[in-house]
Image (cartoon, grey):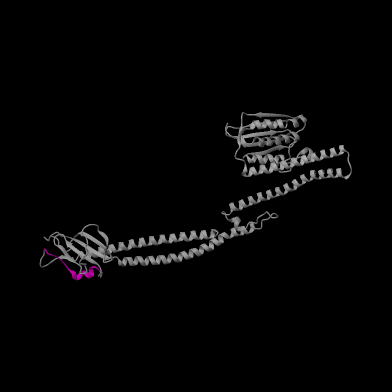
Protein backbone atom coordinates (compact mmCIF):
# COMPACT_ATOMS: atom_id res chain seq x y z
CA UNK A 1 0.00 0.00 0.00
CA UNK A 2 1.44 3.35 -1.05
CA UNK A 3 2.28 5.63 1.84
CA UNK A 4 1.08 9.20 1.94
CA UNK A 5 3.70 11.88 1.47
CA UNK A 6 3.61 15.42 2.86
CA UNK A 7 5.98 16.50 0.11
CA UNK A 8 3.74 15.14 -2.66
CA UNK A 9 0.72 16.64 -0.94
CA UNK A 10 2.33 20.08 -0.73
CA UNK A 11 3.58 19.91 -4.32
CA UNK A 12 0.11 18.87 -5.47
CA UNK A 13 -1.41 21.83 -3.64
CA UNK A 14 1.15 24.21 -5.15
CA UNK A 15 0.60 22.83 -8.67
CA UNK A 16 -3.18 22.92 -8.30
CA UNK A 17 -3.18 26.47 -6.91
CA UNK A 18 -0.84 27.70 -9.62
CA UNK A 19 -2.88 25.93 -12.31
CA UNK A 20 -6.06 27.54 -10.99
CA UNK A 21 -4.27 30.89 -10.90
CA UNK A 22 -3.05 30.44 -14.48
CA UNK A 23 -6.54 29.43 -15.58
CA UNK A 24 -8.00 32.44 -13.84
CA UNK A 25 -5.47 34.75 -15.48
CA UNK A 26 -6.20 33.13 -18.86
CA UNK A 27 -9.95 33.55 -18.55
CA UNK A 28 -9.63 37.09 -17.22
CA UNK A 29 -7.20 37.97 -20.01
CA UNK A 30 -9.43 36.48 -22.69
CA UNK A 31 -12.49 38.21 -21.28
CA UNK A 32 -10.74 41.57 -21.02
CA UNK A 33 -9.13 41.23 -24.48
CA UNK A 34 -12.43 40.24 -26.09
CA UNK A 35 -14.23 43.09 -24.40
CA UNK A 36 -11.64 45.65 -25.44
CA UNK A 37 -11.47 44.37 -29.03
CA UNK A 38 -15.26 44.39 -29.38
CA UNK A 39 -15.35 47.89 -27.93
CA UNK A 40 -12.73 49.00 -30.45
CA UNK A 41 -14.66 47.27 -33.24
CA UNK A 42 -17.86 49.08 -32.21
CA UNK A 43 -16.02 52.41 -32.22
CA UNK A 44 -14.57 51.73 -35.66
CA UNK A 45 -17.93 50.64 -37.04
CA UNK A 46 -19.60 53.76 -35.65
CA UNK A 47 -16.91 55.98 -37.19
CA UNK A 48 -17.34 54.26 -40.54
CA UNK A 49 -21.12 54.51 -40.34
CA UNK A 50 -20.99 58.24 -39.66
CA UNK A 51 -18.52 58.64 -42.51
CA UNK A 52 -21.02 56.90 -44.78
CA UNK A 53 -23.79 59.18 -43.52
CA UNK A 54 -21.77 62.14 -44.75
CA UNK A 55 -21.93 60.74 -48.30
CA UNK A 56 -25.71 61.17 -48.42
CA UNK A 57 -26.58 64.46 -50.16
CA UNK A 58 -29.29 66.12 -52.19
CA UNK A 59 -28.99 66.02 -55.96
CA UNK A 60 -28.18 69.24 -57.74
CA UNK A 61 -30.46 68.27 -60.61
CA UNK A 62 -33.31 67.34 -58.32
CA UNK A 63 -32.94 69.36 -55.11
CA UNK A 64 -35.48 67.36 -53.14
CA UNK A 65 -33.91 64.00 -54.21
CA UNK A 66 -31.51 62.42 -51.66
CA UNK A 67 -28.64 60.54 -53.31
CA UNK A 68 -25.56 58.64 -52.17
CA UNK A 69 -22.05 58.99 -53.62
CA UNK A 70 -20.63 55.42 -53.77
CA UNK A 71 -17.35 56.59 -55.28
CA UNK A 72 -16.19 57.71 -51.85
CA UNK A 73 -17.21 54.58 -49.94
CA UNK A 74 -13.69 53.12 -49.98
CA UNK A 75 -12.22 56.24 -48.40
CA UNK A 76 -15.05 56.50 -45.86
CA UNK A 77 -14.69 52.91 -44.64
CA UNK A 78 -10.87 52.96 -44.66
CA UNK A 79 -10.73 50.03 -47.05
CA UNK A 80 -12.77 47.54 -45.02
CA UNK A 81 -14.01 45.46 -47.99
CA UNK A 82 -15.57 42.73 -45.84
CA UNK A 83 -17.91 45.15 -44.07
CA UNK A 84 -21.56 45.47 -45.06
CA UNK A 85 -23.67 48.55 -44.83
CA UNK A 86 -27.17 49.59 -45.68
CA UNK A 87 -28.68 53.10 -45.46
CA UNK A 88 -32.36 53.97 -45.29
CA UNK A 89 -34.09 57.34 -45.38
CA UNK A 90 -37.26 57.81 -43.38
CA UNK A 91 -38.83 59.41 -46.45
CA UNK A 92 -37.04 57.98 -49.44
CA UNK A 93 -36.72 54.37 -48.16
CA UNK A 94 -33.63 52.33 -49.07
CA UNK A 95 -30.98 54.78 -50.10
CA UNK A 96 -28.04 52.47 -50.79
CA UNK A 97 -26.56 49.12 -49.91
CA UNK A 98 -23.03 47.74 -50.18
CA UNK A 99 -22.28 45.55 -53.14
CA UNK A 100 -21.32 42.61 -50.89
CA UNK A 101 -24.58 42.70 -48.96
CA UNK A 102 -25.82 39.08 -48.93
CA UNK A 103 -29.03 38.55 -50.79
CA UNK A 104 -30.49 36.31 -48.07
CA UNK A 105 -29.20 38.35 -45.12
CA UNK A 106 -31.97 39.31 -42.75
CA UNK A 107 -30.79 42.21 -40.62
CA UNK A 108 -33.43 43.84 -38.43
CA UNK A 109 -33.90 47.58 -38.89
CA UNK A 110 -35.02 48.12 -35.31
CA UNK A 111 -33.91 46.87 -31.90
CA UNK A 112 -30.57 46.98 -30.08
CA UNK A 113 -27.84 49.32 -31.32
CA UNK A 114 -25.26 46.46 -31.27
CA UNK A 115 -25.76 42.75 -31.80
CA UNK A 116 -23.85 39.66 -32.86
CA UNK A 117 -25.10 37.07 -35.31
CA UNK A 118 -23.95 34.19 -37.48
CA UNK A 119 -24.11 34.09 -41.29
CA UNK A 120 -22.62 31.32 -43.42
CA UNK A 121 -20.92 29.96 -40.27
CA UNK A 122 -19.11 33.29 -39.89
CA UNK A 123 -19.66 35.49 -36.85
CA UNK A 124 -20.56 39.13 -37.48
CA UNK A 125 -21.06 42.23 -35.38
CA UNK A 126 -23.88 44.59 -36.31
CA UNK A 127 -24.37 48.30 -35.59
CA UNK A 128 -27.56 50.31 -35.98
CA UNK A 129 -27.59 54.11 -36.03
CA UNK A 130 -31.04 55.66 -36.09
CA UNK A 131 -32.24 59.23 -36.65
CA UNK A 132 -28.96 60.33 -38.18
CA UNK A 133 -29.51 63.77 -39.75
CA UNK A 134 -28.50 64.48 -43.34
CA UNK A 135 -25.37 66.58 -43.10
CA UNK A 136 -25.51 68.02 -46.67
CA UNK A 137 -27.94 70.83 -45.88
CA UNK A 138 -27.54 74.53 -46.45
CA UNK A 139 -28.97 76.90 -43.87
CA UNK A 140 -32.20 78.73 -44.73
CA UNK A 141 -33.18 76.23 -47.40
CA UNK A 142 -36.48 74.54 -48.01
CA UNK A 143 -35.06 71.02 -48.31
CA UNK A 144 -37.09 68.30 -46.58
CA UNK A 145 -36.09 67.33 -43.01
CA UNK A 146 -34.96 63.72 -43.53
CA UNK A 147 -33.16 61.31 -41.13
CA UNK A 148 -31.11 58.25 -41.93
CA UNK A 149 -30.96 54.75 -40.47
CA UNK A 150 -27.62 53.07 -41.01
CA UNK A 151 -26.94 49.36 -40.59
CA UNK A 152 -23.24 48.52 -40.51
CA UNK A 153 -21.95 44.94 -40.21
CA UNK A 154 -18.35 43.84 -39.67
CA UNK A 155 -16.80 40.39 -39.43
CA UNK A 156 -15.82 39.11 -35.96
CA UNK A 157 -13.13 36.79 -37.37
CA UNK A 158 -10.24 39.25 -36.75
CA UNK A 159 -11.46 39.72 -33.19
CA UNK A 160 -11.62 35.96 -32.59
CA UNK A 161 -8.19 35.54 -34.14
CA UNK A 162 -6.67 38.16 -31.84
CA UNK A 163 -8.42 36.64 -28.82
CA UNK A 164 -7.08 33.22 -29.81
CA UNK A 165 -3.53 34.57 -30.22
CA UNK A 166 -3.79 36.30 -26.86
CA UNK A 167 -5.00 33.05 -25.25
CA UNK A 168 -2.10 31.10 -26.78
CA UNK A 169 0.38 33.66 -25.50
CA UNK A 170 -1.09 33.75 -22.00
CA UNK A 171 -1.26 29.93 -21.89
CA UNK A 172 2.37 29.58 -22.98
CA UNK A 173 3.49 32.20 -20.46
CA UNK A 174 1.40 30.50 -17.75
CA UNK A 175 2.95 27.10 -18.47
CA UNK A 176 6.44 28.56 -18.27
CA UNK A 177 5.62 30.29 -15.00
CA UNK A 178 3.92 27.12 -13.70
CA UNK A 179 7.03 25.06 -14.46
CA UNK A 180 9.23 27.65 -12.76
CA UNK A 181 6.88 27.74 -9.76
CA UNK A 182 6.87 23.95 -9.42
CA UNK A 183 10.66 23.83 -9.52
CA UNK A 184 10.85 26.60 -6.94
CA UNK A 185 8.25 24.80 -4.80
CA UNK A 186 10.22 21.55 -5.00
CA UNK A 187 13.35 23.33 -3.84
CA UNK A 188 11.50 25.24 -1.11
CA UNK A 189 9.59 22.22 0.21
CA UNK A 190 12.72 20.08 0.22
CA UNK A 191 14.60 22.77 2.10
CA UNK A 192 11.64 23.42 4.41
CA UNK A 193 11.30 19.73 5.35
CA UNK A 194 15.01 19.31 5.95
CA UNK A 195 14.77 20.31 9.67
CA UNK A 196 12.02 17.71 10.10
CA UNK A 197 14.23 15.04 8.57
CA UNK A 198 17.09 16.06 10.84
CA UNK A 199 14.72 15.92 13.82
CA UNK A 200 13.65 12.41 12.79
CA UNK A 201 17.31 11.37 12.50
CA UNK A 202 17.96 12.65 16.01
CA UNK A 203 14.87 10.82 17.29
CA UNK A 204 16.30 7.55 15.98
CA UNK A 205 19.24 7.98 18.37
CA UNK A 206 16.96 7.86 21.43
CA UNK A 207 17.56 4.77 23.56
CA UNK A 208 17.24 3.61 27.14
CA UNK A 209 20.75 4.96 27.73
CA UNK A 210 20.23 8.21 25.87
CA UNK A 211 16.98 10.12 26.44
CA UNK A 212 18.08 13.58 25.33
CA UNK A 213 17.34 14.77 21.81
CA UNK A 214 19.77 17.14 20.15
CA UNK A 215 17.61 19.64 18.31
CA UNK A 216 18.86 20.98 14.97
CA UNK A 217 19.35 24.73 14.86
CA UNK A 218 16.69 25.06 12.14
CA UNK A 219 14.19 23.15 14.26
CA UNK A 220 14.71 25.57 17.14
CA UNK A 221 14.12 28.58 14.88
CA UNK A 222 11.00 27.31 13.07
CA UNK A 223 7.75 28.30 14.78
CA UNK A 224 5.85 25.45 13.11
CA UNK A 225 8.14 22.83 14.66
CA UNK A 226 8.04 24.27 18.18
CA UNK A 227 4.83 22.39 19.20
CA UNK A 228 6.30 19.12 17.88
CA UNK A 229 9.63 19.73 19.61
CA UNK A 230 7.93 20.53 22.93
CA UNK A 231 5.70 17.48 22.61
CA UNK A 232 8.69 15.24 21.88
CA UNK A 233 10.62 16.63 24.84
CA UNK A 234 7.62 16.16 27.13
CA UNK A 235 7.06 12.63 25.80
CA UNK A 236 10.71 11.70 26.25
CA UNK A 237 10.68 13.07 29.78
CA UNK A 238 7.64 10.97 30.63
CA UNK A 239 9.11 7.88 28.99
CA UNK A 240 12.36 8.33 30.88
CA UNK A 241 10.52 8.71 34.18
CA UNK A 242 8.35 5.69 33.42
CA UNK A 243 11.36 3.61 32.45
CA UNK A 244 13.23 4.63 35.59
CA UNK A 245 10.15 3.87 37.69
CA UNK A 246 9.71 0.48 36.10
CA UNK A 247 13.39 -0.34 36.58
CA UNK A 248 13.26 0.80 40.20
CA UNK A 249 10.02 -1.09 40.68
CA UNK A 250 11.55 -4.33 39.43
CA UNK A 251 14.63 -3.84 41.59
CA UNK A 252 12.64 -2.92 44.70
CA UNK A 253 10.15 -5.72 44.14
CA UNK A 254 12.97 -8.23 43.76
CA UNK A 255 14.59 -6.87 46.93
CA UNK A 256 11.32 -7.02 48.88
CA UNK A 257 10.61 -10.53 47.66
CA UNK A 258 14.15 -11.71 48.27
CA UNK A 259 14.07 -11.07 52.03
CA UNK A 260 11.05 -13.24 52.98
CA UNK A 261 12.11 -15.92 50.53
CA UNK A 262 15.63 -15.97 51.98
CA UNK A 263 14.30 -16.09 55.57
CA UNK A 264 11.86 -18.84 54.67
CA UNK A 265 14.60 -20.85 52.95
CA UNK A 266 16.93 -20.40 55.91
CA UNK A 267 14.26 -21.52 58.37
CA UNK A 268 13.41 -24.63 56.40
CA UNK A 269 17.09 -25.51 55.89
CA UNK A 270 17.75 -25.21 59.62
CA UNK A 271 14.82 -27.53 60.34
CA UNK A 272 16.27 -30.15 57.99
CA UNK A 273 19.88 -29.99 59.13
CA UNK A 274 19.42 -31.87 62.42
CA UNK A 275 16.56 -33.74 64.03
CA UNK A 276 14.22 -31.42 65.95
CA UNK A 277 11.59 -31.83 68.57
CA UNK A 278 7.94 -31.45 67.66
CA UNK A 279 7.85 -28.08 69.41
CA UNK A 280 10.86 -26.85 67.42
CA UNK A 281 9.29 -28.03 64.17
CA UNK A 282 6.08 -26.31 65.13
CA UNK A 283 7.85 -23.07 65.94
CA UNK A 284 9.82 -23.22 62.65
CA UNK A 285 6.68 -23.83 60.59
CA UNK A 286 4.84 -20.98 62.32
CA UNK A 287 7.75 -18.67 61.53
CA UNK A 288 7.68 -19.87 57.92
CA UNK A 289 3.95 -19.20 57.72
CA UNK A 290 4.50 -15.65 58.94
CA UNK A 291 7.05 -15.10 56.19
CA UNK A 292 4.67 -16.62 53.65
CA UNK A 293 1.86 -14.35 54.86
CA UNK A 294 4.08 -11.30 54.45
CA UNK A 295 5.12 -12.52 51.03
CA UNK A 296 1.45 -13.05 50.09
CA UNK A 297 0.56 -9.60 51.40
CA UNK A 298 3.34 -8.03 49.31
CA UNK A 299 2.11 -9.80 46.17
CA UNK A 300 -1.45 -8.65 46.85
CA UNK A 301 -0.29 -5.04 47.23
CA UNK A 302 1.69 -5.27 44.01
CA UNK A 303 -1.30 -6.69 42.13
CA UNK A 304 -3.54 -4.01 43.61
CA UNK A 305 -1.09 -1.32 42.47
CA UNK A 306 -0.91 -2.78 38.95
CA UNK A 307 -4.71 -2.93 38.73
CA UNK A 308 -5.06 0.65 40.01
CA UNK A 309 -2.54 1.93 37.47
CA UNK A 310 -4.44 0.13 34.68
CA UNK A 311 -7.63 1.89 35.78
CA UNK A 312 -5.77 5.20 35.85
CA UNK A 313 -4.77 4.60 32.22
CA UNK A 314 -8.42 4.45 31.17
CA UNK A 315 -9.49 0.85 31.73
CA UNK A 316 -11.65 1.61 34.81
CA UNK A 317 -14.82 -0.43 35.18
CA UNK A 318 -17.91 1.21 33.67
CA UNK A 319 -20.44 -0.39 36.07
CA UNK A 320 -19.75 1.83 39.11
CA UNK A 321 -22.51 2.86 41.50
CA UNK A 322 -23.07 6.18 43.23
CA UNK A 323 -21.91 5.86 46.85
CA UNK A 324 -21.64 8.06 49.92
CA UNK A 325 -18.02 9.14 50.40
CA UNK A 326 -18.60 9.92 54.09
CA UNK A 327 -19.69 6.33 54.68
CA UNK A 328 -16.44 4.99 53.20
CA UNK A 329 -14.49 7.36 55.45
CA UNK A 330 -16.36 6.01 58.51
CA UNK A 331 -15.55 2.43 57.47
CA UNK A 332 -11.86 3.32 57.09
CA UNK A 333 -11.80 4.94 60.53
CA UNK A 334 -13.23 1.73 62.01
CA UNK A 335 -10.63 -0.34 60.15
CA UNK A 336 -7.79 1.68 61.62
CA UNK A 337 -9.36 1.97 65.09
CA UNK A 338 -7.33 -0.94 66.55
CA UNK A 339 -3.99 0.58 65.47
CA UNK A 340 -5.09 4.00 66.72
CA UNK A 341 -6.04 2.59 70.12
CA UNK A 342 -2.64 0.87 70.42
CA UNK A 343 -0.95 4.25 69.95
CA UNK A 344 -3.59 6.12 72.00
CA UNK A 345 -4.41 8.23 68.94
CA UNK A 346 -7.78 9.94 68.52
CA UNK A 347 -9.28 10.31 65.00
CA UNK A 348 -11.82 13.13 64.52
CA UNK A 349 -14.09 12.78 61.46
CA UNK A 350 -16.14 15.76 60.31
CA UNK A 351 -18.44 15.73 57.32
CA UNK A 352 -20.69 18.24 55.60
CA UNK A 353 -23.86 16.34 54.72
CA UNK A 354 -24.09 13.49 52.25
CA UNK A 355 -21.37 13.66 49.59
CA UNK A 356 -21.68 11.18 46.72
CA UNK A 357 -19.32 9.90 44.04
CA UNK A 358 -19.42 7.19 41.38
CA UNK A 359 -16.81 4.69 42.61
CA UNK A 360 -16.14 1.30 44.15
CA UNK A 361 -16.45 1.68 47.97
CA UNK A 362 -13.62 -0.81 48.52
CA UNK A 363 -11.27 1.38 46.45
CA UNK A 364 -12.13 4.51 48.43
CA UNK A 365 -11.77 2.66 51.72
CA UNK A 366 -8.31 1.53 50.57
CA UNK A 367 -7.35 5.16 49.89
CA UNK A 368 -8.59 6.47 53.27
CA UNK A 369 -7.14 3.50 55.18
CA UNK A 370 -3.68 4.04 53.68
CA UNK A 371 -3.76 7.75 54.51
CA UNK A 372 -5.02 7.17 58.06
CA UNK A 373 -2.53 4.35 58.68
CA UNK A 374 0.38 6.57 57.67
CA UNK A 375 -0.97 9.40 59.82
CA UNK A 376 -1.29 7.11 62.85
CA UNK A 377 2.11 5.46 62.39
CA UNK A 378 4.00 8.71 61.89
CA UNK A 379 2.23 10.66 64.65
CA UNK A 380 3.50 10.55 68.21
CA UNK A 381 1.51 8.50 70.73
CA UNK A 382 -1.44 10.36 72.20
CA UNK A 383 -1.73 12.70 69.20
CA UNK A 384 -4.93 13.49 67.33
CA UNK A 385 -5.75 13.17 63.63
CA UNK A 386 -8.41 15.22 61.84
CA UNK A 387 -10.29 13.87 58.81
CA UNK A 388 -12.83 16.12 57.06
CA UNK A 389 -15.17 15.62 54.09
CA UNK A 390 -16.66 18.60 52.25
CA UNK A 391 -18.09 19.52 48.87
CA UNK A 392 -20.82 17.88 46.81
CA UNK A 393 -23.80 19.39 44.95
CA UNK A 394 -22.21 18.75 41.57
CA UNK A 395 -18.82 20.18 42.63
CA UNK A 396 -15.60 18.42 43.54
CA UNK A 397 -15.43 16.62 46.86
CA UNK A 398 -12.47 17.30 49.14
CA UNK A 399 -11.22 14.80 51.74
CA UNK A 400 -8.45 16.06 54.04
CA UNK A 401 -6.38 14.00 56.49
CA UNK A 402 -4.30 16.12 58.88
CA UNK A 403 -1.79 14.73 61.36
CA UNK A 404 0.52 16.42 63.86
CA UNK A 405 3.59 14.30 63.37
CA UNK A 406 7.18 15.30 62.54
CA UNK A 407 6.28 16.34 58.99
CA UNK A 408 8.11 15.59 55.77
CA UNK A 409 11.26 17.29 54.55
CA UNK A 410 10.89 19.38 51.40
CA UNK A 411 13.42 17.17 49.60
CA UNK A 412 11.38 14.02 50.31
CA UNK A 413 7.94 15.51 49.63
CA UNK A 414 7.97 14.99 45.81
CA UNK A 415 8.83 11.26 46.24
CA UNK A 416 6.30 10.16 48.85
CA UNK A 417 4.00 8.73 46.15
CA UNK A 418 6.80 6.68 44.56
CA UNK A 419 6.55 2.90 44.81
CA UNK A 420 8.57 1.26 47.65
CA UNK A 421 9.44 4.68 49.05
CA UNK A 422 9.63 4.86 52.86
CA UNK A 423 9.58 8.30 54.38
CA UNK A 424 11.37 7.15 57.56
CA UNK A 425 14.43 4.98 56.78
CA UNK A 426 14.61 3.95 60.42
CA UNK A 427 11.41 1.93 60.07
CA UNK A 428 11.90 -1.78 59.29
CA UNK A 429 9.80 -3.95 57.04
CA UNK A 430 8.09 -5.27 60.12
CA UNK A 431 6.93 -1.84 61.31
CA UNK A 432 7.00 0.36 58.24
CA UNK A 433 5.14 -1.60 55.56
CA UNK A 434 6.27 -2.02 51.97
CA UNK A 435 6.17 1.59 50.79
CA UNK A 436 3.28 0.91 48.39
CA UNK A 437 0.36 2.46 50.29
CA UNK A 438 0.61 6.02 48.95
CA UNK A 439 1.46 4.79 45.44
CA UNK A 440 -1.75 2.71 45.42
CA UNK A 441 -3.75 5.61 46.87
CA UNK A 442 -2.47 7.96 44.17
CA UNK A 443 -3.22 5.47 41.37
CA UNK A 444 -6.77 4.89 42.66
CA UNK A 445 -7.46 8.60 43.03
CA UNK A 446 -6.26 9.31 39.48
CA UNK A 447 -8.31 6.35 38.21
CA UNK A 448 -11.45 8.18 39.36
CA UNK A 449 -10.38 11.47 37.79
CA UNK A 450 -9.22 13.03 41.05
CA UNK A 451 -6.06 14.52 42.49
CA UNK A 452 -4.05 13.92 45.64
CA UNK A 453 -1.53 16.36 47.12
CA UNK A 454 0.64 16.50 50.22
CA UNK A 455 1.41 19.66 52.21
CA UNK A 456 3.88 19.39 55.03
CA UNK A 457 6.26 21.41 57.17
CA UNK A 458 8.90 19.80 59.33
CA UNK A 459 7.71 19.74 62.95
CA UNK A 460 4.14 20.82 62.07
CA UNK A 461 2.63 17.63 60.63
CA UNK A 462 1.33 16.64 57.20
CA UNK A 463 -1.92 17.37 55.43
CA UNK A 464 -3.05 15.02 52.63
CA UNK A 465 -5.77 16.48 50.37
CA UNK A 466 -7.79 14.31 47.98
CA UNK A 467 -10.22 15.84 45.50
CA UNK A 468 -12.72 13.66 43.62
CA UNK A 469 -15.48 14.55 41.15
CA UNK A 470 -18.75 14.29 43.03
CA UNK A 471 -22.24 13.46 41.78
CA UNK A 472 -25.36 15.56 42.49
CA UNK A 473 -27.32 14.35 45.48
- The quarter holding residue 96 reads bottom left
On the rendered structure, is 432 left or right of 464? right
* As drawn, 391 above or below 76: above
- The quarter holding residue 364 reads top right
Task: Tell me where residue 277 appears, x and y as whole percent.
Answer: 88, 39
At a point 19% along the width and 63% down the height, the residue shown is: 87
- Residue 412 visible in the shown view: no
Q: Can you say which quadrant of the picture contains the C terminus? A: top right
At a point 12% along the width and 64% down the height, the residue shown is: 65
Question: Nearest the camera: 454 or 327?
Answer: 327
Task: Tell me where residue 34 appears, x and y as whole percent.
Answer: 34, 62
* As drawn, 211 above or below 56: above
Question: Nearest the camera: 342 or 427?
Answer: 342
The stretch drawn in magenta includes residue 123: no
Q: Which residues are magenta?
A: 64-77
Question: Nearest the camera: 116 or 306?
Answer: 306
- The quarter holding residue 271 reads top right
Amino acid sequence: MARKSIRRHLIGIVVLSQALLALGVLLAGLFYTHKRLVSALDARMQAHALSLAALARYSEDTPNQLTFDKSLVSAATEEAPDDWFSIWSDQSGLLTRSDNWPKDAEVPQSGAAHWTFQADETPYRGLRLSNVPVLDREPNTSLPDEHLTILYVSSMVPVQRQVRDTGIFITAAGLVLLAATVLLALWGIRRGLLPLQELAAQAELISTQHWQIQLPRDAEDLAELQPLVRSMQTMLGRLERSFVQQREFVGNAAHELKTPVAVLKSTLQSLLQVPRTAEEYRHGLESSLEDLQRLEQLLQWMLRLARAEQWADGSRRPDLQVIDISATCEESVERIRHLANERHTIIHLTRNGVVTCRADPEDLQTIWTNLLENAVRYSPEGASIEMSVSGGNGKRTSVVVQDHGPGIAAADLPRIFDRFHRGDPSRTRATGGFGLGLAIAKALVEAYGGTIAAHSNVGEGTRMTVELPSCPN
